[in-house]
Amino acid sequence: MNKEAVKKELKSVVAMLVASFAFALSLDLFIVPNKIVCGTLTGLSTLVNFLINNALGIGTLTIIFDIPILLLGLKTQGLKFIVRCLITILVLGGITDLFAFLEPVTNDLLIASIYGGVIQGIAIGIYCKYKVSSGGTELLGRIISEKFKFASIPVCIGILDAIIVITGSIVLKNPQNILYA
């Protein structure tokens, strides 16, 4: 590996760490304590966490839910991409559970949804810029779009995330969740 390739890979790893830290803090400081079920696999993990009375951490649940998706993606995405996803998933899940003890910044649902969403958006932007994936609905969207060529990755992700948000709203009997998520 040449010097430029090492430098590029190091930048990618640092970006992944920063994005994972930001995403985890958005969950722990804004989203989860305000019982907002957002899209993404962490949203599904948040919902399940509420239903099982915090028996497992959201990060742990996300890792568990991501394993079958990683295995599905191996064929279409390649080993290198899947290994990078696995590392990101483990880091994000670990940081999420590690900082779950933090007190929420606010109990105002609107402020929590805005700041949580903006921070998650920044984290996802960093993941995209450095070609890192945290798996979840993004990886599942890639897999589905490979199978059904007429469906783009963003459309697939949007549909999957919408299903999670709507399911969370129904299960928690909170239709406003759709607006906050």
Image (tube, rainbow, N blue to C red):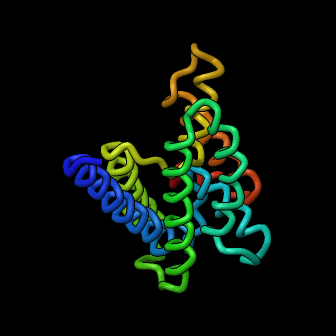
- Residue 149 visible somewhere in the drawing: yes
Q: Quadrant of residue 161?
A: top right
Q: What residue do we see at 26% from left, 49% from top?
A: 8
Q: Is residue 6 above or below residue 75?
A: below
Residue 12 at what x, y percent from top left?
A: 32, 53
Residue 106 at what x, y percent from top left?
A: 43, 76
Q: What residue do we see at 73% from left, 57% from top?
A: 173
Q: Quadrant of residue 57?
A: bottom right
68 or 161, nearer to the observer: 68
Q: Is residue 108 above or below residue 85?
A: below
Q: Quadrant of residue 46?
A: bottom right
Q: What residue do we see at 53% from left, 80% from top?
A: 98
Q: Is residue 101 above or below residue 83?
A: below
Residue 105 at what x, y percent from top left?
A: 41, 78
Furthest residue in direction left, as rendered: 4
- Residue 119 visible somewhere in the drawing: no
Q: What residue do we see at 64% from left, 46% from top?
A: 70
174 or 138, nearer to the observer: 138
